[in-house]
Amino acid sequence: MSGVIRHVTISGRVQGVGYRAWVDEQATSRGLEGWVRNRRDGSVEAVFAGAEDVVADMIAACNRGPFSARVDAVQATAVNPDLLNQRRAGERFAVLPTV
């Protein structure tokens, strides 16, 4: 995998509004690798890996989210490839269980 890997946390009204499914669809259509999941604190957490400009575009899209969401904040940090290992073998992008 070449490019960048970003860990992203999205807060606001982002659970129960189709946010994870929207992220899955958006990331897959952009050809990104990674995963998304809900967190018990009400936020959504994601990891995006791919070309720097494509990852940046995905993070910008996360600031908008799906129509029914209200995004208050998006935080993104660079991480190492080990964080991608939370997916099952062979998965390019995954929706993971809540943590």
Image: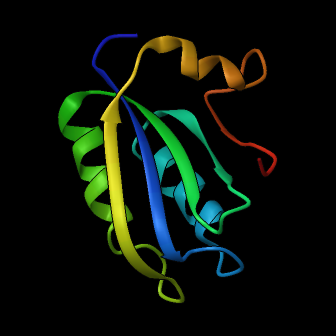
**Image location (x, y in percent) of residue 82:** 55, 12
Which residue is found at the position 63% from the left and 61% from the top? 20
Residue 32's place in the image compared with 80, above or below, is below
Which of the colour schemes (rainbow, by chain, secondary structure, one colour) is used? rainbow
Which residue is found at the position 76% from the left and 15% from the top? 89
Residue furthest to the front: 41
Side of 1 relative to 20 (left or right): left
Quarter residue 86 falls in: top right
Which residue is found at the position 53% from the left and 45% from the top? 46
**Image location (x, y in percent) of residue 12:** 49, 77
Residue furthest to the bottom: 68
Q: Nearer the viewer, residue 11 or 81?
A: 11
Quarter residue 55 falls in: top left
Residue 3's place in the image compared with 36, above or below, is above
Which residue is found at the position 24% from the left and 51% from the top? 57
Side of 12 relative to 55 (left or right): right
**Image location (x, y in percent) of residue 3:** 27, 18
Side of 35 relative to 31 (left or right): right
Residue 85's place in the image compared with 37, above or below, is above
Report how many numbered discs are placed on residues in the image. Answer: 0
Q: Nearer the viewer, residue 75 or 68?
A: 75
In the picture, the quarter occupied by the N terminus is top left
Quarter residue 51 falls in: top left
Residue 80's place in the image compared with 65, above or below, is above
Q: Nearer the viewer, residue 49 or 81?
A: 81
